[in-house]
Amino acid sequence: MPLWADRSKIKEFYKNCPKGMVIDHIIPLQGKLVSGLHVHTNLQYLTQKENSVKLNKFSFDDYKETDHYKQWLNSLNEAIEKFSKE
């Protein structure tokens, strides 16, 4: 977990895990092609079945269709726009 990770948001995410779901790292912590971080923006809820199928795999083609990616992209574009005005 990086020092800048928001521990309270991670705890809240775990606390709010719906019944019958498990917590998954969207980008695996130890993937073969990419490795993600233990931060709240890299967490998602999956069923146990979905998680067992996913394993430590990451598909950018699948990921770019998720709301998570779209929100991240919007945040990135806002930051770039803000930075370019300074």
Image: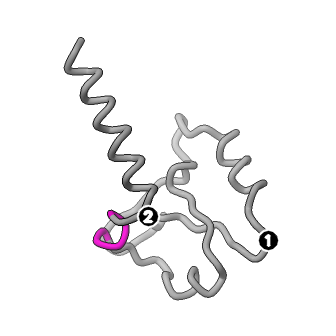
Give the residue type at disc 1: Lys
The picture places residue 49, in percent across and down from the top left corner, at: 62, 87
Instruction: Describe residue 60's horizontal placement relative to residue 20 as left or right.
Output: left
The picture places residue 15, in percent across and down from the top left corner, at: 78, 54
Q: Which residue is mark 2?
A: 27
The picture places residue 57, in percent across and down from the top left corner, at: 41, 78
Give residue 19's mark: 1
Q: Is residue 86 above or below residue 64?
A: above
The picture places residue 73, in percent across and down from the top left corner, at: 33, 46
Outermost residue toward the left in this view? 84
Give residue 72's mark: none
The residue at 61%/73% (across/down) is 46
Helix, strand or loop at disc 1? loop
Q: Quadrant of residue 35?
A: bottom left
Q: Quadrant of residue 34?
A: bottom left
Instruction: Describe residue 47's horizontal placement relative to residue 20 as left or right.
Output: left
- In three-dimensional space, the C-alpha distance between marks 2 and 1, rounded to whole angstroms, equals 23 Å
Q: Is residue 70 above or below residue 24?
A: above
Give the residue type at disc 2: Ile
> Quick one: 45 or 34, which is closer to the camera?
45
Q: Which secondary structure class fits the magenta region best? A: helix
Q: Residues within 10 Å of mark 1 (few under 14, many from 20)?
A: few
Instruction: Describe residue 20's horizontal placement relative to residue 71 as left or right.
Output: right
Q: Is residue 37 above or below residue 80?
A: below
Residue range (magenta): 60-64
